[in-house]
Amino acid sequence: MKFFVDTADVKEIQELNDLGLVDGVTTNPSLIMKSGGKILDVTRQICEIVKGPVSAEVTATDYEGMMKEAKVLMKIADNIAIKVPLTLDGLKACKAIRSDGRMVNVTLCFSATQALLAAKAGASFISPFVGRIDDMAEEGMEIVSEIRTIYDNYDFKTEILAASIRSVNHVKQAALIGADIATVPPATLKALVKHPLTDKGLATFLEDWKKTGQHIG
Ligand code: E4P
């Protein structure tokens, strides 16, 4: 499973990229707002760090407006994936952008049938929002599982990008289901490494090693 990092914080992206944990990045208007930067500057800086797909979202809601914004965003770098909302205009824009050979991430997906439409529009990525479905007292991962089945039934090449990931357990469940990618907030990505028995075991090894009086090298 590939890991995308779900942030527009350039410092955090740099740190995680240096650790070798980043296969791509997803941003959205809320994340750009949190970064405090200008969308074109921030996205350009991210593309200088990360070689994999970097999602940049359009804010227009009509087809013409989306295409106009997509053209501006696509100029930032070749690894930009244009993020469009899962609406009829978004799907039309998806089809048009894909026919130009550029990547598209169809976002704000909350049902398997929406995901089916995105695949038929040729989306590179479909983003089911797991955490936001959980917030509605429903099971977000069920949608990911349904999409996996439907895409495999018809051999759709659209990659499932589990989004709105809120916990380590979400990452594990997405991996078990076979999501192609999880887009994960930086803190959750770092939390994947944590286990109390790893810390305890390491402390014991270091104590015992000290008692031997040995040094390596
Ligand atoms: C995905 O591309 C979105 O940016 C993100 O995962 C949304 O997550 P949230 O529901 O935590 O805002």
Image (spheres, rainbow, N blue to C red):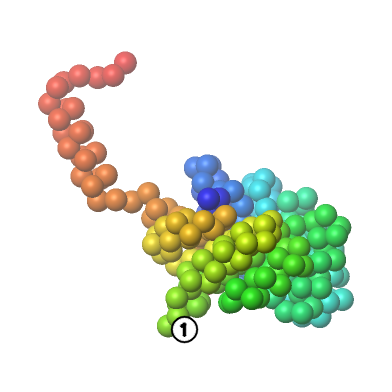
Looking at the picture, how far across and down is residue 148, in whole percent?
A: 57, 62
Going by the numbered disc 1, the residue's amino acid type is Met
Residue 169, given in percent of the width and then of the height, sits at 39, 62
Q: Which residue lies furthest to the front in this view?
A: 153
Place residue 180 in its image quadrant: bottom right
Check the image and name the residue furthest to the left: 211
Residue 16, horizontal then vertical, whole percent? 51, 48
- Looking at the rendered image, the quarter that the C terminus falls into is top left
Secondary structure beneath disc 1? loop
The answer to whether residue 182 is above or below residue 89 is: above
- Say which residue appears at 40% left-offset and 60% top-offset: 168
Residue at 56 percent across and 56 percent down: it is 181
Q: Is residue 25 left or right of residue 212?
A: right
Is the residue marked 1 within 8 Å of ligand 1, measured from its CB? no
User: Is residue 67 in sight in this rendering?
Assistant: yes
Visible residue check, residue 36:
no
- Residue on which the image places disc 1: 136
* Residue shown at 76% from the left, 74% from the top: 90
Q: Which quadrant of the structure image shows residue 43? A: bottom right
Looking at this view, is 115 or 66 the one in front? Answer: 115
In the foreground, 43 or 36: 43
Q: Nearer the viewer, residue 160 or 15?
A: 160
Tell me the quarter of the picture where residue 36 sits. Answer: bottom right
The residue drawn where x is 15% and y is 30% is 208
